[in-house]
Image (cartoon, helix red, strand yellow):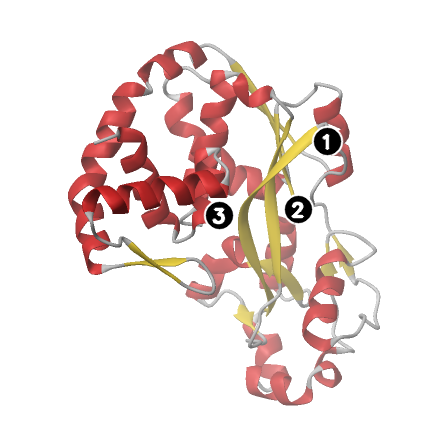
Amino acid sequence: MDLALLRTFVMVHRAGSFTRAAALLGLSQPAVTSQIRTLERQLGRPLFLRQARGVRPTVIGDELAHKIAPHVDALLEIAGADLDDQGAGRTLHLAGPPEFTALRALPALVPLISRGLTVRAAHGMAEELFEGLSDGHHDLAIATSRPRGRLLAATPLCDEEHVLVAAPRWAARLGGPAVVRDKGLQALEHLPVVEVHESLPFVSRYWSAVFDSKPLAAGTVIVPDLRAVLSCVAAGAGIGVLPRYLCGEALDTGEVVALLDPPVPPLRTYFLVVRAGTLAHPHLARAHEWLLRAAVSW
């Protein structure tokens, strides 16, 4: 049986979507669909049930995935040894938001770093990252928007949920999440705000998505990055909006409290962006694939 078909099957099973699997594999969605249909014809059994959003494995699909996935991974590791050898000693110039790069991207690349990949990380705003990519200063960028034009190619990486947080004493003073839910903006409009810029990018996005409004107050504390927002909020300087991956541990320990649990939480999508054609470089292709694979569990 063709290893490529099995690899595609395992990736679809893990990703839960033909579209997501296609991005992880660097294939088009029709190519992934065609490969799965070929495998289903060879086995004489359906492997996935198509749903409105993604796919769900059948019982046969689940059984097959559990049986073959470890062996497929091992074979692909052997087959990818040459690619790793070609990438050994090469430098990856990675750029993205400092917090996401530090807490998500760089740890995910450690297995490649241990095999000889050298990484140089930089940070900046989306337009700065795109300009750096276009000028050849970066090889791979993580951005929160898609670039325009054909010079740069973007692949969705993951979504992050934004959470409105405060120190426990602020939450107690407000009366808890139930009061915030009932009163909405009225409960929040006079509270001090901690942000990363005078334009209040995170708070404004949250207010627009949840309250269909704009913040009425200016920022009380403006700090350089989101980790500083978390520290200030936890110390009681005011309320803030943070990605869940960044404040999840603080929420679990009670260092900060979520002030609201909206039915549809605000989300922001991250994209992996490269110059068109550069995924032909083995070390870059490997890092691109590794980040997409890691992002499945983010």
The residue at which mark 3 appears reads as: 19
The crowding category of the residue bearing disc 3, from other C-alpha atoms within 10 Å (few below 14, some 14 to 19, many at least 20), is some
Residue visible at 67% across and 68% down in the picture: 239
Q: Is residue 127 left or right of residue 109?
A: right
- SS class, disc 2: loop
Q: What residue type is labelled 2?
A: Thr
Q: Which amino acid does label 1 sit on?
A: Arg
Work out how far the residue at label 2 is from the one at label 3, CA to CA, in angstroms: 19 Å
- SS class, disc 1: loop
Indicate whether 268 appears above or below 212: above
- SS class, disc 3: helix
The residue at which mark 2 appears reads as: 144
Q: Which of marks 1 and 2 is nearer the N terminus?
A: 2
Q: Nearer the viewer, residue 103 or 269?
A: 269
Q: Is residue 117 left or right of residue 209?
A: left
Indicate whether 224 appears above or below 237: above
Q: Earlier in the sequence, mark 2 or mark 3?
A: 3
Q: Which amino acid does label 3 sit on?
A: Thr
The residue at which mark 1 appears reads as: 150
